[in-house]
Image (cartoon, rainbow, N blue to C red):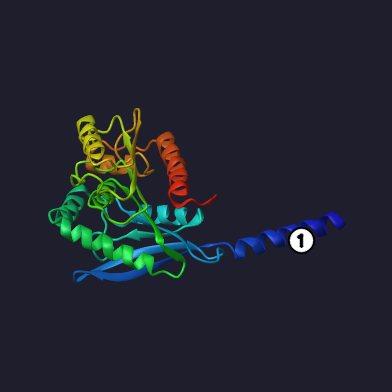
């Protein structure tokens, strides 16, 4: 009977802890240059006070559940994260033709991309749970290219991390013009980001005296962090594939990277 009572007490303590520690996710509406945007903000409401903010820029499919999931995961690590809407109205797709059209509309005028990214960054900085002096960004595929572009034009970010991102998007930075520390994860078997593109990116970063690192995963194809990559690849006849090892290793290294740039001991 005493053991049963202790079990009930422990269970109640566990449930109470769970009740006071949860990830809150909210849709946030904002505008950039007249375009209506719908982002997603996530944070752990059990943490008191301000914490660093992380922008999450989606793959070329648009702001879907995958980007929001990564924001939730960052919130679980103790950050406030905002999944950015780069296309407007939070639209997304599973079809490459639509994704290409959405992406082209943004990337054909990099000023548009810059304004949409900056609008999201302003929203994130204004959140009551965010320390506006500690902001970083991560991006996937198209989003990786976006965060690298923002870093290369000297955006005031502590750091950016690109996962299987397009490396040819980054503007050629001026020497000393890159403020953010840069971390790039790419796959050696990714035909969409060939070795030539990696080499050019490295050369540009070296010439700009940027603080950067490129991590290459043998055998990893494009979209290696997304568990739905194989499905997307089949639907669109594209060389996409999930790679569990590369996914887990890159996420772990990103966590260490964030701790380093923010000088904080988030678990």
Q: Name, please, the residue furthest toward the top.
A: 218
Residue 1 visible in rendering? no
- 81 vs 103, left or right, is right
| Nearer to the camera, 73 or 122 | 122
x, y percent for residue 138: 35, 50
- 47 vs 64, left or right, is right
Snapshot quadrant of residue 241: top left
x, y percent for residue 208: 24, 42
Snapshot quadrant of residue 244: top left
Which residue bears the numbered disc 1? 9
Q: Residue at x 22, y 44 (%)?
A: 175
| Nearer to the camera, 155 or 112 | 155
- 5 vs 189, left or right, is right
Quadrant, the N terminus: bottom right
x, y percent for residue 209: 27, 40
Does residue 201 lie above or below 151 as drawn? above
């Amino acid at each position: 009977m005493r053991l049963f009572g202790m079990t009930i007490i422990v269970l109640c303590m566990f449930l109470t802890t769970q009740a006071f520690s949860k990830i809150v996710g909210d849709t946030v509406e904002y505008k950039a240059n007249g375009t209506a945007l719908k982002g997603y903000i996530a944070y752990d409401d059990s943490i008191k006070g301000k914490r660093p903010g992380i922008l999450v820029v989606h793959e070329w499919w648009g702001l879907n559940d995958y980007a929001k999931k990564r924001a939730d995961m960052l919130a679980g690590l103790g950050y406030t994260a905002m999944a950015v809407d780069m296309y407007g109205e939070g639209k997304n797709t599973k079809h490459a033709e639509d994704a290409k059209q959405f992406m082209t509309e943004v990337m054909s005028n990099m000023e548009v991309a810059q304004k949409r990214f900056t609008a999201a960054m302003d929203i994130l900085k204004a959140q009551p749970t965010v320390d506006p002096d500690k902001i970083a960004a991560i991006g996937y595929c198209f989003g990786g290219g976006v965060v690298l572009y923002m870093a290369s034009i000297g955006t005031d970010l502590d750091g950016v991390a690109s996962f299987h991102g397009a490396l040819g998007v980054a503007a050629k930075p001026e020497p000393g013009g890159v403020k953010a520390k840069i971390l790039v994860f790419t796959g050696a078997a990714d035909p969409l980001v060939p070795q030539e593109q990696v080499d050019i990116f490295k050369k540009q970063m070296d010439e700009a005296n940027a603080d950067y690192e490129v991590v290459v995963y043998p055998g990893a194809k494009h979209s290696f962090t997304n568990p739905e990559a194989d499905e997307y690849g089949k639907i669109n006849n594209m060389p996409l594939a999930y790679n569990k090892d590369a996914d887990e290793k890159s996420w772990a290294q990103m966590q260490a990277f964030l701790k380093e740039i923010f000088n904080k001991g988030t678990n």
